[in-house]
Amino acid sequence: MPTEKTELRRSLRARRNALSPEDQRLAAERLASNLIGTRLFLVSRRIACYLPNDGEIDTGPVIEHIRHLRKICYLPVLSRLSHDRLWFAEAKPKTKLVPNRFGIPEPAVKSSDLVRAQELDLILMPLVGFDDQGNRLGMGGGFYDRSVGFLRHRNRWRKPHLLGIAYDFQRVNGLMAEPWDIPLQGVITDQAIYLY
């Protein structure tokens, strides 16, 4: 039986997959321009991004800016042990990528080269939908929430900071937060900067 979140995921994913290549390219460039002027981006050195999948906004321009500004770019890697959380690997221009069990490319590195979320300054997170309270609707696997779950037990936000990146049409009204959800500090889109 489809739930409200299931239906919302389906419609938002269909909408982003329907964009033309030119619309996708322009949106990705606008998003990168919006992001690089934010304080959180400017003060961060170790930044995790992701490679787009299933119509997600292209992160290529963002990754180019991270490298151009001599910041360190990381990409998520599915844990080889617990299979339910993410580690992060530095992604240099010539880093070899291999598909994970979902078919998403990730760096092919030794386990000793992986870092935990706690070691990053900023994580740019993919999402399917978001609301004005910083709630994020992901794909439903919970990988990011489990990987940054430690932030729930702190008195105040510290590293890493969490920003979602998305198309502006992915903004929706009032997502119901689950107890395990970790709120975002902001969302950067192709049209706007939302900080919470």
Image (cartoon, rainbow, N blue to C red):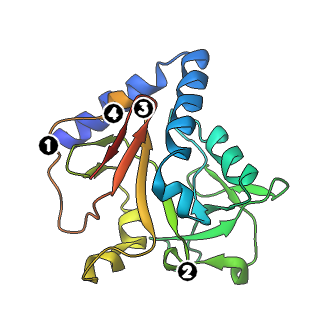
Please state which amino acid type lies under the numbered disc 4: Gln
* Dot 3: element: loop
> Distance from label 3 to label 2 (Cα)?
33 Å
Say which mark, if any, is on residue 170. Answer: 4
Q: Residue at x 32, y 73 (%)?
A: 157
> Distance from label 3 to label 1 (Cα)?
17 Å
* Dot 2: element: loop
Q: Residues within 10 Å of mark 2 (few under 14, many from 20)?
A: few
Question: Could you tell which of marks 3 and 2 lies nearer the N-terminus?
Answer: 2
Q: Residues within 10 Å of mark 4 (few under 14, many from 20)?
A: many
Q: Residue at x 60, y 69 (%)?
A: 88
> Distance from label 1 to label 4 (Cα)?
12 Å
> Distance from label 4 to label 3 (Cα)?
6 Å
Q: Where does residue 160 sit, x and y in percent of width and height?
A: 45, 70
The residue beneath circle 1 is: 174
Q: Where does residue 173 sit, x and y in percent of width and height?
A: 16, 36
Q: Residue at x 44, y 26 (%)?
A: 16
Task: Choose between 96 and 34: the one closer to the eye.
Answer: 34
The residue beneath circle 3 is: 167
Q: Residue at x 34, y 27 (%)?
A: 169
Q: Where does residue 175 sit, x and y in percent of width and height?
A: 17, 46
* Dot 4: element: helix
